[in-house]
Image (cartoon, coloured by chain):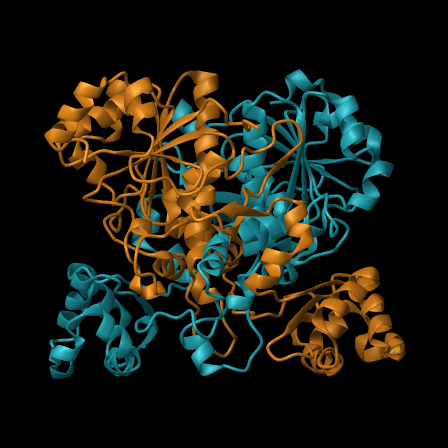
Chain colours: A orange, B cyan
């Protein structure tokens, strides 16, 4: 399976989480992604990560998988020259350094356009390529804070909540989308573009309705697990310790379904709960009634019964539940990959199922540093062994 | 309008039938990137028109956000919908699986009628698999995909350890599915092969939660009570909250300077990252006591000078007034009935120095009914 993006080549200068997730998604869709690193400046997954208790290189790194690997020293003039040769053979050049770094390296948009007139340069950064804060460094929790999603998330009587890797990877997903959009423009007009993906704007975009509410003079609030229209709506305690059942009553059918599964059809005639608006007004009392029931239920069984009765429900799942789920596996949203030592582990697939050009998926794990230099430096860029050895000797390939 | 400002998807025609946020988000992103997106609505209008929060009589902020830049046509029955879809490049639909055949919207029927169309299905649990028929709202889906169980972390779970886990504000999971749907649609279109694209909100939210699955493979089951940084995180200041994260040694040195080189920080036991982590709790108590004495604006300004990653937990109003946001022009004023122009975030990606424009506000129901009467080629 080649995937819909077969034939698209990406010179991938991204590091850390957001940028590499972007090119990883494109790689699963069939693009040939050539990850550029050096032994001096390897990406984080090749180094110990004490915060997560990892003492050496990762044996598998989701966002580095399905990619090719070459070494290039971007601090060396001939390394830069080679990087430009690679870009000249590519459709997309992706990077996630602080704004200005690529230009300082001699790999800014103008320099890349000079070697490939219609190149799509994809820049992923915390605060965008322009504006007074563009030089700010940031991690996912800061994107979430700047973009408002952190302030809006939380218990109504508590503090804001820190966004984590999901925020990084959301930025990467947006970047992947934008990259393919830019390819379409190139196909139509012949023009490349410099795509600017700004992480704090990605966070803000997920709360665009709250921004409109504020702009129109309203005061957006922190809803926690509650909803401005639906009730019951929330995360309710189930029978086992730390097990939880989510329920959302979207309409009358769901309301009557919930009552029948709870064995509380008597409440259907209760004037306090006669309409959606009435239920919402007394939602705290209603939540208590629902929780009295959920406390006695197995979350999985209750969710299945509620779904049969037309009420949206699902357990709050930890990762072992997710990795083992038959539905997610049937959809290849969860796939197995093989570690170098032969053990299997779960990974996530690209969240796109295509009937005619199915994604290529995770066709290889994490490449060794420089594993694909024969193919890229040799076959693609036409460097013979002697030339490569001398570039290694002078430190351009390192 | 020059090429760059026009958006990269100029000329691409999209018909969107949406009752939920995910499918509407897909159309919204396509519209912001320049595609011509027609919202095909039942005579009662999409339910999103009736979703709170409201910003005026009958004006939904959610609908205003998701429908900005689109056109609206009322389609009464399958025939009108099919007339609209003639000549479209992309059809987005979130009709539940069980209702599709009656509307001629099952994949086989769409394929027969429009062999070249990219038919994008957007459903809570997707169109195939054992749970394809399940209903799902945002709260169900963010918890079905892993991130819900892991929230809140840090200060919030410290304060309320016994409360239920928490969803992210608004429609985060559904928004990811909208992005995934656009990625899928544009990839299918790139391959020049008409086909069925099956998007699941659960899959999309799980994909952006990939790190928790990575950790599982590494042998660690993440939990909201333990996935906190040892120190830093959400910090309360005199007049608001900041996020503070010092992952590198030089950032810690900057933080010490920011705090005014307190004696406790000079403890040689805090010199290396590993022992700092071990004393995270004590360090955080010190940071919290210090930060409470200072206003946010003062701290974040100095933190940036010292290279300390620290940012304000912005309220929506602060973002609207943000100098950085406004310098980048991320808000486009769009007209809304009875309200005049309201600034609306156009899109979090751009294809040159300028933000993408929003060509119009949310359409009135059936505002573009004339499109039904025109041959496809004349629609512009």
Q: Position of residue A355 (x, y in %)?
A: 67, 31
**Residue B118 appears in the figure:** no
In-image side of A251 versus B33 (left or right): right
In-image side of B373 versus A69 (left or right): right
Residue extending farthest to the front is A341
- Tell which of B347 and B154 is nearer to you: B154
- Tell which of A77 and A2 is nearer to you: A2
- Tell which of A184 and A218 is nearer to you: A184
Give the answer, above or below, for where A15 lies relative to B70.
Answer: below
Q: Quadrant of residue A65?
A: top left
User: Which quadrant does the C terminus of chain A fall into?
Assistant: top left
Q: Quadrant of residue B115?
A: top right
Q: Position of residue B121 (x, y in %)?
A: 68, 39
Residue at (55%, 44%) from the top-left corner? A349
User: Which quadrant does the N terminus of chain A fall into?
Assistant: top right
- Tell which of B349 and B173 is nearer to you: B173
Q: Position of residue A13 (x, y in %)?
A: 30, 37
Q: Position of residue A57 (x, y in %)?
A: 32, 52
**Residue B76 appears in the figure:** yes
Give the answer, above or below, for where B360 lies relative to A323.
Answer: above
Total numbered labels placed on residues in the image: 0
In-image side of B147 versus A22 (left or right): right
């Amino acid at each position: 399976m080649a995937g819909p993006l077969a034939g698209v080549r990406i010179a991938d200068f991204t590091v850390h989480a957001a940028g590499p997730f972007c090119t990883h998604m494109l790689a699963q869709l069939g693009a040939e992604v050539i990850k550029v690193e050096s032994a001096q400046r390897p990406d984080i997954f090749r180094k110990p990560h004490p915060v997560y208790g990892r003492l050496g290189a990762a044996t598998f790194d989701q966002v580095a998988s399905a990619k090719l690997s070459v070494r290039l020293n971007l601090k060396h003039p001939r390394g830069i020259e080679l990087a430009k040769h690679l870009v000249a053979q590519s459709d997309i050049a992706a990077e996630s350094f602080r704004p200005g770094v690529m230009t300082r390296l001699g790999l800014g948009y103008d320099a890349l356009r000079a070697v490939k007139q219609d190149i799509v340069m994809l820049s992923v950064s915390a605060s965008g390529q322009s504006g007074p804060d563009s030089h700010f460094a940031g991690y996912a929790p800061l994107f979430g804070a700047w973009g408002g999603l952190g302030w809006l998330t939380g218990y109504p009587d508590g503090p804001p909540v820190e966004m984590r890797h999901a925020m990084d990877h959301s930025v990467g997903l947006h970047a992947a989308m934008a990259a393919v959009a830019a390819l379409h423009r190139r196909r139509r007009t012949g023009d490349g573009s410099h795509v600017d993906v700004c992480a704090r704007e990605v966070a803000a975009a997920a709360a665009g309705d709250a921004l409109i509410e504020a702009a129109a003079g309203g005061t957006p609030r922190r809803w926690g697990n509650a909803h401005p229209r639906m009730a019951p709506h929330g995360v309710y305690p189930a029978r086992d310790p730390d097990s939880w059942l989510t329920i959302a009553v979207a309409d009358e059918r769901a309301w009557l379904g919930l009552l029948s599964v709870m064995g509380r059809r008597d409440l259907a005639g209760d004037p306090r709960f006669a309409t959606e608006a009435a239920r919402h007004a007394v939602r705290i009392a209603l939540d208590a009634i629902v929780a009295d029931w959920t406390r006695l239920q197995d979350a999985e069984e209750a969710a299945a019964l509620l779904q049969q009765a037309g009420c949206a429900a699902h357990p709050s799942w930890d990762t072992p539940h997710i990795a083992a789920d038959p539905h997610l596996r049937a959809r290849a949203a969860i796939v197995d990959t093989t570690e170098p030592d032969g053990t299997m582990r779960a990974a996530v697939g690209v969240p796109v199922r295509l009937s005619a050009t199915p994604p290529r998926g995770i066709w290889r794990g994490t490449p060794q540093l420089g594993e694909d230099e024969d193919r890229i430096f040799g076959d693609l860029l036409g460097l013979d062994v002697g030339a490569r050895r001398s570039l290694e000797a002078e430190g351009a390939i390192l | 309008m020059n090429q760059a400002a026009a958006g990269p998807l100029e000329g691409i025609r999209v018909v969107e039938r949406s009752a939920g946020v995910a499918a509407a988000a897909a159309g919204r992103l396509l519209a912001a990137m320049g595609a011509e997106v027609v919202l095909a609505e039942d005579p009662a209008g999409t339910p999103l028109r009736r979703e709170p929060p409201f910003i005026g009589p009958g004006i939904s902020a959610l609908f205003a956000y998701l429908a900005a830049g689109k056109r609206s046509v009322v389609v009464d029955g399958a025939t009108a919908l099919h007339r609209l879809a003639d000549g479209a490049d992309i059809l987005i639909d979130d009709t539940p699986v069980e209702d599709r055949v009656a509307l001629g919207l099952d994949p086989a029927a769409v394929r027969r009628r429009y062999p070249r169309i990219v038919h994008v299905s957007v459903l809570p649990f997707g169109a195939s698999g054992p749970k394809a028929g399940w209903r799902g709202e945002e709260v169900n889906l963010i918890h079905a995909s892993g991130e819900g169980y892991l929230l809140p972390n840090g200060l919030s779970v410290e304060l309320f350890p016994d409360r239920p886990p928490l969803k992210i504000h608004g429609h985060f999971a559904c928004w990811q599915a909208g992005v995934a749907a656009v990625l899928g649609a544009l990839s299918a279109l790139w391959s020049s092969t008409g086909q069925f694209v099956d998007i699941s909100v659960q899959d999309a939210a799980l994909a952006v939660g990939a790190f928790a699955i990575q950790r599982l493979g590494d042998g660690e089951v993440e939990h909201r009570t333990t996935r906190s940084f040892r120190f830093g995180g959400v910090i309360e200041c005199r007049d608001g909250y900041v996020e503070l994260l010092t992952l590198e040694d030089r950032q810690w040195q900057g933080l010490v300077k920011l705090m005014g080189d307190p004696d406790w920080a000079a403890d040689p036991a805090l010199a290396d990252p590993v022992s700092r982590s071990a004393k995270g709790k004590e360090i955080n108590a010190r940071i919290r006591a210090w930060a409470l004495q200072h206003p946010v604006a003062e701290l974040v300004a100095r933190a940036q000078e010292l290279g300390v990653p620290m940012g304000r937990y912005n309220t929506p109003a602060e973002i609207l007034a943000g100098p950085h946001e406004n310098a980048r022009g991320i808000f486009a004023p769009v007209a809304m009935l009875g309200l005049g122009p309201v600034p609306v975030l156009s899109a979090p990606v751009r294809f040159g120095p300028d933000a993408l424009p929003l060509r119009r506000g949310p359409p009135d129901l059936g505002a573009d009914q004339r499109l039904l009467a025109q041959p496809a080629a004349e629609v512009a």
